Structures are given as C-alpha cells and as structure tokens.
Image: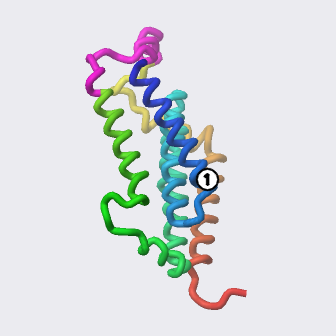
Amino acid sequence: MSVDFILFYAFAVMAIGSALLLVSIRNTARALFLLFIVLFAMAGLYLFALADFVAITQILVYVGGVLILLIFAFMLSNKSLLSDIHTVSHRLTALPNLPSFLLASVFLAILLFALSSWNNNMPEWMAAAEADGSLIQPTENNIRMLGFKFMTQYVLPFEIISIFLMMALIGAAHISRKGERP
C-alpha cells in the first residue's frame, strides 16, 4: 500500500469520523472544532481529486472565513456556554484528552511511514502528468492566471462567496450584540 492510499484513507476516515462526532456531540465549542477538522479533511480529499483550486477555496473561505466567524460569534454570544469547557479534568491522561492524543498519534504514524517509505521517486499520478505534459511547472505564473479567472470566468461565484461572508459577518455581529432580544 502506498503513501497516497494511506493519506487518502486517513483524510476520509477523519472526515467521516469527525462528521459523525459533529452531529452527535452536545457541546457547541467542541462541535465547532470538529467542523474545522471535517472541512480541513475535505480539503485534503479535494487535493486527491486533483481539484487544488477547490481545496484552496475550501481552506480560505470555509476554514479561514466562515468557521472563524462562527467561533467568534460563539465566544461573544453566551458565556454560560463556555462554562462546561472549564470543568474538564486537567490530568494529561483524562478521557477528553484521548481524541487529541489519538489524532496526534495518527498524524505522527502517517508522517513516519511517509518518511520511511519515501525513496525520492515521484508518485505514479505525478509521473503520468509529467509524461502528458500537464504538470504545472514552478516557473508558470499561476497567481496571475488565477486572478484573471476570478475576475472573468468566475466573477459570479466570487461575488456570491463575498456576499455569503458578509452575511456571516452580519449574523455574527447580531449574535454577539449585547442587550435584550425579542
């Protein structure tokens, strides 16, 4: 089994497992961090589908924008929701720390396996892309091409995403507003 398959299945298991935990957990703060893991794992799966633009957009818009706004809205909305986070035991071997240790161990195992099995050869899909001549070279100016695509071919989705982010910001400001709500 190659490193590509192991990474693909690791991202798939992380996405599915975190999504299942996300819909079953009652703590909102932990659910937001699980949403971060789901969105990040999905970006990794997009990379395996050779959709690097979608993966970068996933990280920039959803992980970098919407999720951060949700976290800020949660942190500013109600301090009583944060009180159950502080009741966790401070022992290193406590049960709430187990998923963190498990995730860190899995990442370490994948990293060590990748380093031990790497023999300075290109993966098969990259060698096939190089043989076809479709491999992007470092000398190509992809940023300029991406800017032209954003402002010509993808201007409507770009504007829809900006409106979506503005709505999320307005919602976060409304939730975090102090005072009586009707």
Residue at the location (62% across, 77% down)?
174
The location of residue 135, given as percent across then percent down, is 43, 19
Q: Is residue 53 magenta?
A: no
Q: Secondary structure at mark 1?
A: helix
Residue at the location (58% across, 59% down)?
25
Q: Is residue 116 magenta?
A: yes
Q: Quadrant of the C terminus?
A: bottom right
Left or right: residue 114 versus residue 16 is left
Residue 147 in sight here: no
The location of residue 6, given as percent across then percent down, is 44, 27
Question: The magenta stretch spans which residues?
Answer: 115-134
Disc 1 target residue: 161
Q: Amino acid at mark 1?
A: Ile
Q: Nearer the viewer, residue 69 or 85?
A: 85
Outermost residue, bottom side: 180
Q: Nearer the viewer, residue 137 or 103?
A: 103
The location of residue 95, given as percent across then percent down, is 42, 58
Residue at the location (50% across, 42% down)?
14
Q: Nearer the viewer, residue 146 or 37?
A: 37
Residue at the location (57% across, 87% down)?
178
